[in-house]
Amino acid sequence: MTWLIFEWNLILFLKRTDCSCSFFSFTAMSSYLYIIKYELPIVIQSFTGASDGEWYINGNYLVLLVSLFVILPLSLLRNLGYLGYTSGLSLLCMVFFLIVVIIKKFQMPCPLPIPDALNETMRMLNSTPHIDNVTSDDDDTCKPKYFVYNSQTVYALPILTFAFVCHPTILPMYEELKDRSRQKMQNVAKVSFLAMFIMYLLAALFGYLTFN
């Protein structure tokens, strides 16, 4: 009877784990598709110089193409070993992004220069005192602070929550290890978490120091 109870609890645990993995994977994929829909057209347009009427910079078409030709084939793989190549590519993209963020910190002035068109509009509205106030506010904004709390701080909560999406992938990663053991899995987790922590910390730090 004890063994039956244990097996039943184990089955329930595995079912809950599967549901949790499926839920987190679905939410992560949805967020990625959201980024593809609204950010990828801008990237393609910047490289090709295409006009807004071209079909290949339409976000709806891009989401459909990525889902059919990228996500679907990858989701049909029998094991996660083949995803190492795509993960390596994504890691290189993240390193490139980090390098760009660090370089931009030393290239972009603070405060950002006001466009000529905006300056002309401000002069037409005869709002010179307001420009002085904006300049003083910008000077104060360019001073880094240890902690900033305002009405937009709440937008950081979804980003912090999304960082924990890696937890459901621990079990599939463990299954893919050769000669897997608890110690080997701990070593993989320590190296992975440390590398990602350093990378995201530098990206967040230099991103903040660029725009404050």
Image (spheres, rainbow, N blue to C red):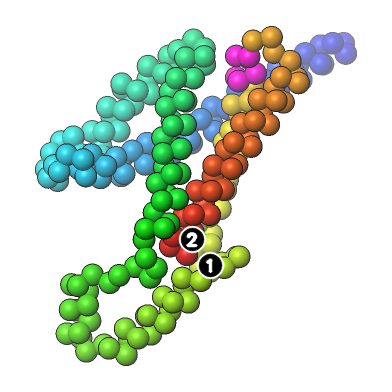
Image quadrant in which you'd find residue 137: bottom left
Measure how far apart labels 2 and 1 are at the Cα level: 7 Å
Which one is earlier in the sequence, the residue at label 2 or at label 1? 1
Above or below, 45 relative to 179: below
Instruction: Check residue 175 for magenta coloring.
Output: yes
Which numbered tag is attached to residue 37?
A: none
Q: Of 122 and 161, which appears nearest the observer?
A: 122
Name the dominant secondary structure of the magenta segment. Answer: helix
Which numbered tag is attached to residue 144?
A: 1
Above or below, 130 relative to 192: below
Label 2–label 1 contact, CB within 8 A: yes
Q: What is the span of residues highlighted in magenta in the rendered image?
A: 172-177
Instruction: Check residue 44 for magenta coloring.
Output: no
Residue 37 is left or right of residue 194, and the answer is left
Residue 35 is left or right of residue 88, and the answer is left
Dot 1: few (<14), some (14–19), or many (≥20) neighbours within 10 Å? Answer: few
Is residue 162 visible in the rendered image? The answer is no
Residue 94 is left or right of residue 64, and the answer is right
Image quadrant in which you'd find residue 169: top right
Q: Of 153 and 82, which appears nearest the observer?
A: 82
Amino acid type of the residue that numbered disc 2 sits on in the rendered structure: Leu
Amino acid type of the residue that numbered disc 1 sits on in the rendered structure: Pro
Question: x, y (%) of residue 50?
Answer: 13, 42
Which numbered tag is attached to residue 209?
A: 2
